[in-house]
Amino acid sequence: MAPTGKAGIYRGSVKDFPDFNAEQDAEALYNAMKGFGSDKEAILDLITSRSNRQRVEICQAYKSLYGKDLIADLKYELTGKFERLIVGLMRPPPYHDAKEIKDAIQGAGTDEKCLIEIMASRTNRQMHALLAAYRDAYEKELEGDILGDTSGHFRKMLVVLLQGTREEDDVVSEDLVEQDAKDLLDAGEAKWGTDEAQFIYILGHRSKQHLRLVFDEYLKISGKPIEYSIRAELSGDFEKLMLAVVKCIRSTAEYFAERLYKAMQGLGTKDNTLIRIMVSRSEIDMLDIREVFRTKYEKSLYSMIKEDTSGEYKKALLKLCGGDDDAAGEFFPEAAQVAYRMWELSAVAVAKVELKGTVRPATNFNADGDAQVLRKAMKGLGTDEDAIISVVPYRSNEQRQQIIQAYKSHYGRDLLADLKSELSGSLAKVILALMMTPAQYDAKQLKKAMEGAGTDESILIEILATRNNREIQAINEAYAAVYQKSLEDALSSDTSGHFKRILVSLALGNRDEGAEDLTQAHEDAKVVAENLKLADVSSGNTDSLETRFLSILCTRSYPHLRKVFQEFVKMTNHDVEHAIRKRMSGDVRDAFVAIVRSIKNRPAFFADKLYKSMKGIGTDDRTLIRIIVSRSESDLLNIRQEFIDLHEKSLHQMIEDTSGDYRKALLAICGGQD
């Protein structure tokens, strides 16, 4: 049996088969492969229901009975992804890792992601077994092959991890924790340049328990999570490796849940990654991975595999998964611990992380000079779009308002009207959006969402669920000034039911701004649980219950709501976002989900919306422009960091898929490549 996790409880999905008989299994496999064609169903049923130890015994029995190599016969009979999966299961784990690494480094290019995944996640014991298996299988030293195929700090860190010398003592020295946190800060954020050797030594040698405390201390003294500093100070494959190490130290199960999700999201499946993880974790921590997966992505790993794969390959993967966490009666209590911890981490991160925009006030700013540049760019035949782009995206909104005044003073003309006349298409939308004040722009977007035949509810939700009281009040003033109607009246006449009540409540800008109240948070969590039918309703009046639920989500302070959602987890064993998605529908569900996600991690909420606006065929330019412009001076830098973390592709890279002057303007606002 494979090693156990969580206080001695076995957390794999594949267990020893009871009443196991290696000779009988060998015979069954031989019969499944003899003659014309093969019985793939019989092969997958047998192999996925035996532990790796038992599969090794079957290989030996097969050799004794038939004088043949079982793995060679399986390779001959099976094809494609199904063959890779079944053959992977037949190898002992260290030999499976050795084969994956060999495949990653041989040939023209190197699969750095595979190297990073294996090296960052294996224990000392697993690493020592891998070295021995590689030596036995290929008659070469793995370290030599790594040295020959990689370079720089990436290579140095891989070699350190390869030694399998991470400290394993759980006794932690507070003084050493403080010293390591200070050394990491001094090696990166507090230093001109970066001392990579310090990062390599501390992250490559210290115990997991020690490093978790170091990361907490680092957040305290720097105001940033260690991940933010790694992204800022390191680069390339070395940066990706160090981030993977940090993720595995925080939670190996969460690291693999994220890898699995990314392997299946979007167009096409990264089958090698999917197979490697499902095989390698099936007897270690697949149950933990499943719990994190469902909590983090609002769907079960089982259901995502089912939607994303097909045939015998799908059946075999589902057997390794071991169960559907969305099925009745299969909710794991441990998932609550994961969800509770995630809310705690988000509360700490939000309190400590400094939000940063990508557009800052230009130094040596001269409004008259900029007005002159813009006038010259639009005067005469043709328009100099490059000149306009060289000014507008590189000034803060306050500076742009000064340019508008200077332009009016010098030329007696309306700058916005001239820009509108001279520019066209998506570029015009970006430049004109930048020239408005944030409140004017939001007011215009809300008005456009409500005018015409249909209402764009997603825009109403996005803006009203993510703006603070001061921003909401400014939007109300701008809306009334431009459209001679209050925003509340506009929302009331254009929406209905509970959705109208949510929007009107948010549009009042009356959210509390105080700290959490633990006693009140417990009571509020009960109301949320009762409304989502996850607790017995204690108040007979359903309308009153719904009103209280709406009031809690729309008027309580963000710090308080984080505590409410933690109490909700403790009370119901559900994550609040997942519960809302499962038990509500339509615009009401979308509005509440947006509120929850904004409370938990607003930059991640916007990063996800930006990704969806650009993935697949065609770009949702309206959403792309709205978010890039509106977040450019508040938290676009944080959104960029979340974007690359969530999607393994930078926002800059995805914007490059747009074209012409529109692309130039967006990239200028985006502010750089991550």
Image (tube, rainbow, N blue to C red):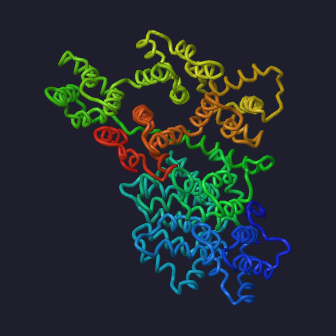
- How far across and down, in percent of the image, does residue 329 sit? 81, 48
Of 459 and 561, which appears nearest the observer? Answer: 459
Q: Which residue occupies 73% across, 63% down?
A: 12
Of 366 and 408, which appears nearest the observer? Answer: 408
Residue sitting at the far front: 36
Residue sitting at the far right: 19
Instruction: Report whether residue 212 is seen.
Output: no
Question: How many badges with numbers are in the image?
Answer: 0
Answer with the quarter of the image where residue 25 lies. bottom right
- How far across and down, in percent of the image, does residue 452 sit? 47, 19
Residue sitting at the far left: 380
In the displayed structure, 61 sits above or below 153; it is below
In the displayed structure, 246 sits above or below 570; it is below
Of 286 and 395, which appears nearest the observer? Answer: 286
In the displayed structure, 137 sits above or below 364; it is below
> Quadrant location of the N terminus?
bottom right
- How far across and down, in percent of the image, does residue 324 sit? 73, 52
Instruction: Report whether residue 5 is seen.
Output: yes
Residue sitting at the far top: 484
Q: Which residue occupies 50% across, 60% down?
A: 242
- How far across and down, in percent of the image, does residue 386 sit? 23, 37
